[in-house]
Amino acid sequence: MIQEFKSSDDILQFAIGREQESVDLYTGLAETARNPEMRGVFEQFANEERGHKKRLQNIQSSGQFSFTPKQVQDIRIGDYLVDVEPHPGMSYQEALIVAMKKEKAAFRLYSDLAATVSDQLLRSLFSSLAQEESKHKLRFELEYDEVVLKDN
Amino acid sequence: MKIKDIITPFSAWSNIVKKPVTVKDPFTERPGADRYRGFHKNDVEACIGCGSCEAVCENQAIDLVPVEGIDTKKGDSGLRPLVDYGRCCWCALCVDICTTGSLTMSNEYTWVSDDPDDFRFIPGVDKKPWDNNEKGWTNPGYSLYNPERVNMEEIEPDERITNFIEIVKGYSKEQAEKEADRCVSCGICVASCPAHMDIPGYIKAIRDGNLEKGLQLLYDTNPLPEICGRVCTHRCEEVCSVGVKGDALAIRWLKRYIADNVPFEDYKRILGLDSLPEAKKHIAIIGAGPSGISAAYYLRTMGYRVTIFEAKEHPGGATMYGIPKYRLPMEMLEQEIGLLEEMGVQFRFNTMIGREVKFDELYAAYDAVFMGIGFEKPYLIAIEGEEGPGSMQAIDFLREVNEGKKPEIGNHVAVIGGGNVAMDAARVSRRLGAKVTVLYRRRIVDMPSDPEEIEGCEQEGIHIEPQTIPTRIVKDEKGNVTGIEYLKAEMVDDPKGRRPKPVPIEGSDTILEVSTVIGAIGQEAYYDFLSAEWLEKLKLERGRVVTNENMQTSIERLFAGGDSVNSTADAISAIADGHRAAKGIDALLSENE
């Protein structure tokens, strides 16, 4: 896979594509959700993913990119939860699990890519994307901790 | 007249040349005695504005007033005493009664000012020269009230784990009056009670031996005092001013004392329910839990016809099906429900809205609908192995036991969670003969359960293992549960400043051998009974129904309350919601007339 990335522009294009996949996933879930509240939740998730995509597009168009490595807290709530297959009647708990798992998978992908490239710029870009995804995952985990794990 | 009578007044002039006996030097300041009762001082940080000083003052020299910079918060009225020295007689009763010990008196007694308003000030806030005066009157060690709570008798732990008999025995008349006598009538507890019950009022009724008055005061805001007198989360006691330096009043047990000691056959007469107003409009209530029963009671007293639709065979909701009988005996519920039936409230049991009756029909046929559906859908632990025998949800387990069944749980049960439902599941499992371990993700201090439930668990030999994160339910080749795997956790600060978060410690994997795993991490509401069209109209947030202050939902004639609305999820909040909704429904229907 790494051979496909010859430049930072390739990486950004790939990442933008992934964010668009997320937008499509959450938009689809919003359209099929039976519960209007869940529709709103998925629309919010989709909007957040649009924001991520926009940010990447800005980097692509401006050529401006800076990355400061920062330790993002990992409370690992999603690590031990069973996978949820998205379906129209998803509960809030299930929606959060889907979102956590998705962000975790994206984090792993970018972390693995960062570890395999030798070019410093490309590595920074992958690391930056991994860091972003870990922040998104943390956001969903904190929500899960506050709402679902209130009594635990 | 004798000559002596004429001369004697002139002889008094001889005293003018004598040295004065009393004030030798009128221009030298004379300090008060070390224990003199002079002008007041108040440690405003320690003061909670309970008002016991104001209540005890016979001269009405003290007013509790707002103070800039001191906000009202839980257990603090935000008010502070203002003393009027035109009325104060310096008796120091206010100091002696002060529940926090913040109010004292300096030994300063002289102060000159041309402005009479200067002699009305807020000690500790309006700075005075004697604020740092160490001498004066402080409480000498005695107390105007007994700081120690009258002990409540309970069944011993060894005996109680063999049965489901109610643990708490209740106060006798003498014990209740002695406990009631400790109340300083400050009323700071009222704000913390979701139903804003007149707590000082009904405690006074016990002191006065007037239980009928006490019962009336209970029912003014709470039609389920027998239940709340046993299982209330008693937030009132957390803020009781007497509890600052001693034991908080046993408010819950005093409420129970009144409800237990007024003959039930007298309730209708005492509460004036013999001749209720003429029935007017008809209200439907979904769910016979505490919020629904509360709404039904108050609506009926306002003259509405009320029908309660309940999916289960019996009323009571979570109190009937979720709370173990050693905490709340069944007959208490039956008695309070019986009162509603006598008032003319109709019950339709085994009638689920959406199944037996469509919500559309209900909404069309009744003038208003109240929805108190509770939280009946458990959150799953969502770890590997949760499906299948040997793994169950606490609310299902507790319901089965309350229905008289005896679920097969084996010899060692792991309960996952730290709330009251988890504690109930643990203590019931113990009574079914199992060894019990509670696995909780955070520290014991973080457990949302009532402290007395945690204490009860420990007394009954239940082990609580804090900072444990379940990762997998282990099963044998036949699919039977054989253990639960967990990781130990360390607590890290939350980035947003909320409660600390548990983070698994790598390599701390442990397998606890158990025969059953009971999940009790929380619940949410089912809204499946509503069609897509109604759900579209009903505003929800994080699974809870959004209401205004009158408990009115986004659907005009639909009101809601209880666990599916409030975040405290306890009986007293549900009761308060039901009362507010009844008033809201009355206001809406009166407006539309």
Image (cartoon, rainbow, N blue to C red):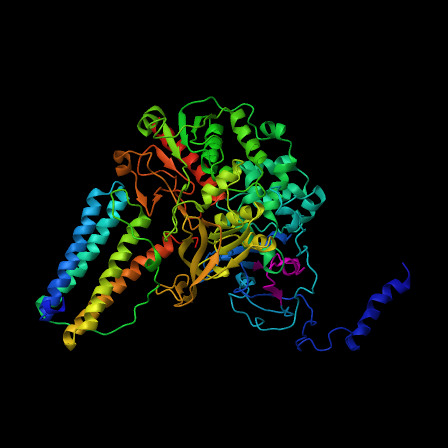
- Residue B494 seen: yes
Residue B16's place in the image compared with B555, above or below, is: below
Q: Is residue B446 magenta?
A: no
The spot of residue B458 in percent (x, y) is 58, 56
- Quadrant of the frame with the N terminus of chain B: bottom right
Tell me what residue is drawn at x 36 percent, y 38 percent.
B552
Tell me what residue is drawn at x 46 percent, y 56 percent.
B72
> Which sits in the foreground, B87 or B445?
B445
Q: Residue B209: name its quadrant.
A: top right
Residue farthest front in this picture: B477
> Which sits in the foreground, B289 or B577?
B289
The spot of residue B153 in percent (x, y) is 67, 48
Q: Residue B282: name its quadrant.
A: top left
- Residue B222 seen: no
* Apparent side of residue B177 relative to residue B231 in the rendered image (left or right): right
- Quadrant of the frame with the C terminus of chain B: top left
The spot of residue B118 in percent (x, y) is 54, 64
Residue B109's place in the image compared with B225, above or below, is: below
> Which sits in the foreground, A49 or B129?
A49
Residue farthest right in this picture: B2
Tell me what residue is drawn at x 18 percent, y 61 percent.
A52
Magenta residues span: B83-105
* Apparent side of residue B318 relative to residue A131 in the rendered image (left or right): right
Residue B349's place in the image compared with B196, above or below, is: above
> Which sits in the foreground, B296 or B52?
B296
Task: Please tell me how many numbered marks the rendered image carries.
Answer: 0
The spot of residue A16 in percent (x, y) is 13, 61
